[in-house]
Image (cartoon, rainbow, N blue to C red):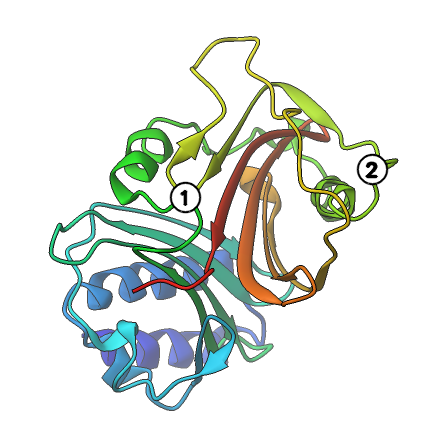
Amino acid sequence: MLKQILVATALYLSSVSAECTYSSLQEFTKAYVTQQATGAFATTASSAAYTENFRPVNISSGVISRPLRIDFSRSTHDTTQCATYTEIIVTNPSHPYVIGTQLRFSSDGTTLTNINSVVTDAGDWLFNATGTLKWASVENWGTIPVEKRDTRAVIQAAADAYLDLFNDPSVKAPWGTPCARLEGGAYTGSGAPTDSCNVGVPSGVPLTNRRYVIDETVGEVDVFVDFGNNKIPDTHEFRIEGGKIRFVHTMTATGGA
């Protein structure tokens, strides 16, 4: 089924326009989530380069090839870079996961070229899939009215300020109010209008090699980073509203089971 979707979308794009469209990216992420539930995506997207936690992995033996009972997913779509980001939460007690995946396509949107996943499970930073599901499922990451949307530059600048703060305490992050951070399964908010994200970050920690996926329609940017001098695989995802940080989701693969 996924292969049919990929082929049909490619044919449509090549016959109509040589550009990446929001609707085609939505079809791709829908197919990714659907096929991850059966493990079929690893077969039908086998020509793409695949990494887990920033290391090349054989796609036929990676997590992407395993059937997962997905409890929650949310995807965003970047037509400028022809890329997507999907957050997946699996609470199956036999092996829970929280996975963040960036998909990247050729500029015309017809070919899936790269699949890059940050895969977190037991033993990773503050990992708790049930806690992650509890909070992620009630947050509002919905579409922002056109007249209220931030530009790509504003969205990225807000995320960069937060990430720069880890290595430079003089940086002023554009905190919104309310604002909540979800790190592993730990949450800084309670749903109150006074919730704050300004509750401290580590110091002297460079977050480098940033790879962005930006979706202006929902004010989102996901950033894959090398965390600290040990270059720990990490993804920071942000919801930006009016230039201010509203939500932050963090997955850090510190050494799971």
- The percent coordinates of residue 81 (x first, y second) are 63, 66
Q: Are marks 1 and 2 in contact (CB under 8 Å)?
A: no
Q: Does residue 42 sit above or below 72 in this rendering?
A: below
Residue drawn 17% across and 62% down?
A: 68
Residue 66 visible, this orientation? yes
91 sits left or right of 210 in the view: left
What is the residue that sits farthest to the left in this orientation?
94
Residue position marked by numbered label 1 in the rendering: 126
Query: Horizontally, is 143 left or right of 88 in the view?
Result: right
Q: As drawn, is 248 to the left or to the right of 134? A: right
- Is the residue 6 above or below the residue 223 in the image? below
* Residue hosting label 2: 169
Q: Nearer the viewer, residue 94 or 75?
A: 94
Residue 95, position in %: x, y? Answer: 18, 58
Residue at image position (52%, 72%) is: 104
Q: Amino acid at mark 2?
A: Pro
